Amino acid sequence: MRELAERKIGEGRRSVTVNLAESPLGWLRSRGHVSARQFEAGERLRGDYETASLGARVTMRWDAAPRPGGRRGPPLGLDPTLAQISAKRRFDAAVKAAGPGLADILWRVVCAGEGLTAAEKGLGWPARAGKLVLGLALDRVADHYGLK
């Protein structure tokens, strides 16, 4: 059975449907290896990472021209470039909160989408060590985001 969820990307401007079972974090959550709090922290971190990774607009905008007397400026909040910068700052702060020994596994599994086994091998860790370290990293990120 596929677990589908709609996720907002880019400050509420776009949404995509993703299969939660495809992400390593979703897989760990579905099997009870990650708590709901840890999962939400990872999803927030990944959302900031994806928003920060979006490239700035370098071509012409094809939005409708503003109406006379209408509101000027970007709709729905921040300019896309400012949203990208803001997301980058949030991402950097969250990774810093995780700490240098935990940030590697956190980035590999949550942001890069590596499986836990592949991340452990890539870091030269023994089998099943990654799950424990990832849990600690997600707890620190959840504390940073103020999740209950």
Image (tube, rainbow, N blue to C red):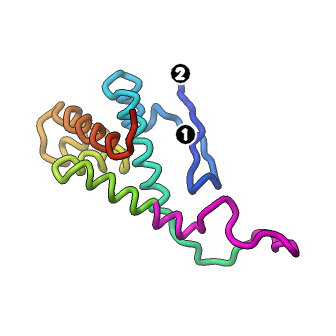
**67 or 110, nearer to the observer:** 67
Q: Residue at x 58, y 55 (%)?
A: 11
Which quadrant of the view contains residue 16? top right
Residue, far right:
68
In the rendered structure, which amino acid carries the disc numbered 2?
Met
- Where residue 1 appears, as percent x and y from the top left, is 53, 21
80 above or below 10? below
In the rendered structure, which amino acid carries the disc numbered 1?
Val
Residue at disc 1, secondary structure? strand
122 above or below 18? below
**24 or 147, nearer to the observer:** 147
- Where residue 128 appears, as percent x and y from the top left, is 18, 31
Other residues around mark 1 within 10 Å, as few (<14) / some (14–19) / many (≥20) = some
Residue on which the image places disc 1:
18
**Which segment did they paint magenta?**
62-86
- Where residue 65 appears, as percent x and y from the top left, is 82, 74
- Closer to viewer: mark 1 or mark 2: 1
Instruction: Give the side of residue 15 with respect to residue 34, left or right.
Output: right
Q: Residue at x 37, y 49 (%)?
A: 111
Main secondary structure found in the magenta portion: loop
Task: For marks 1 and 2, give the CA distance.
Answer: 14 Å
